[in-house]
Image (tube, grey):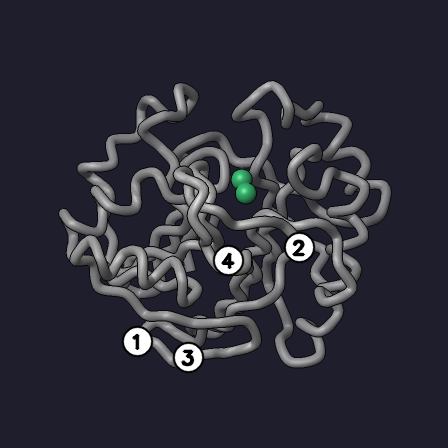
């Protein structure tokens, strides 16, 4: 499983020859100006919640690629009205896709569309792919519900927001890593705006002191799980 960071909370996941995008917010992100969304491959687009900084490029990419959007019921209804194919889910539910199993799990956050309309409840995803399992937390506070994940899934990587202010910060992300029983963390949702700028070295040191590994990828950088 290959995971590429496209800035903010935007990810690419490749499982065998299947390409999955997560929360594409690329064209408005000046730090991601070198990423051309017209070149991104997508068979599926996972959307954690309806906030603008998670959906802004969904419509363009889905219409170009024909990708199926996977998200909560309300977000899929929204994309259906735009003629985009979607797979609706809700919290606690899982589904077997051709690339693996996806479970939509709780996040403590909000989820309105940019026009203020209802975007369902926010979530995260647990993906059990080909021999590798990952957790994409979405925008969330630290929550005890995270402890449910390792009861069923042994994670190889946890992707956690670390920018604070709108989501968990570093100290809560370290606790989240305990809750989900995964010491290998890819940080996201940081540095895009002034509210969520972090000190990279201090963040990595705090994880290291707890015998954990915080990975911060450059935009366009990738790791293999
Ligand atoms: Ni949000
Ligand atoms: Mn966000």
Q: Is mark 1 within 8 Å of ligand 2?
A: no
Is residue 5 visible in the rendered image? The answer is: no
Quadrant location, the N terminus? bottom left
Q: Residue at x 41, y 38 (%)?
A: 114
* Residue bearing mark 2: 108
Q: Mark 4 highlights which residue?
A: 225
* Residue at the extreme right: 209
Q: Which label sits on residue 95?
A: 3
**The CB of the residue at mark 4 lies under 8 Å from ligand 2:** no
Task: Find the distance from the CA under tag 4 to the CA under tag 2.
Answer: 27 Å
Q: CA distance from mark 2 to mark 3?
A: 22 Å
Q: Earlier in the sequence, mark 4 or mark 2?
A: 2
- Residue 34 against residue 20 in the figure, above or below: above
Assess disc 3: are there few (<14), some (14-19) or many (≥20) residues with their C-alpha within 10 Å of its C-alpha.
few
Q: CA distance from mark 4 to mark 1?
A: 19 Å
Q: Quadrant of residue 6?
A: top left
Which numbered disc, 4 or 1, marks the residue closer to the eye?
Answer: 1
Mark 4 surroundings within 10 Å by alpha-carbon count, few (fewer than 14), some (14 through 19), many (20 or more): few
Q: Which of pointers 1 and 2 lies earlier in the amino acid sequence? A: 1
> How busy is the neighbourhood of tag 2: few (under 14 within 10 Å), some, or many (20 plus)?
some
Q: Residue at x 58, y 49 (%)?
A: 110
For marks 4 and 1, the one nearer the N-term is 1
From the image, state whether disc 1 or disc 3 is nearer to you. Answer: 3
Residue drawn where x is 64% and y is 23% of the image: 195
Which element is circle 1 on? loop
Reading the image, the residue beneath label 1 is 98
Query: Nearer the viewer's eye, disc 1 or disc 2?
Result: 2
Residue 70 placed where, x, y %? 36, 63
């Amino acid at each position: 499983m290959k995971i590429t960071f496209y800035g903010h909370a935007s990810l690419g996941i490749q499982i065998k020859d299947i390409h999955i995008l997560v929360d594409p917010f690329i064209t408005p992100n000046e730090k991601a100006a070198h990423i051309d969304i017209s070149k991104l491959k997508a068979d599926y687009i996972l959307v954690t919640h309806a906030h603008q900084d998670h959906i802004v490029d969904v419509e363009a990419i889905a219409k170009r690629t024909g990708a199926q959007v996977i998200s909560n019921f309300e977000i899929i209804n929204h994309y259906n009205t735009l003629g985009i194919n979607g797979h609706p889910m809700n919290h606690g539910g899982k589904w077997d896709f051709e690339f693996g199993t996806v479970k939509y799990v709780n996040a403590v956050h909000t989820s309105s569309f940019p026009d203020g309309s209802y975007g369902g409840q926010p979530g995260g995803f647990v993906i059990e792919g080909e021999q590798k399992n990952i957790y994409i937390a979405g925008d969330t506070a630290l929550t005890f519900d995270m402890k449910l994940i390792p009861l069923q899934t042994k994670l190889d990587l946890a992707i956690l927001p670390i920018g604070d202010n709108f989501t968990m910060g570093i100290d809560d992300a370290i606790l989240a890593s305990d809750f989900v029983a995964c010491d290998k963390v890819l940080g996201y949702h940081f540095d895009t705006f002034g509210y969520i700028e972090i000190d990279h070295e201090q963040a990595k040191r705090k994880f290291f002191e707890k015998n954990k590994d915080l990975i911060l990828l450059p935009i366009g950088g990738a790791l293999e799980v």
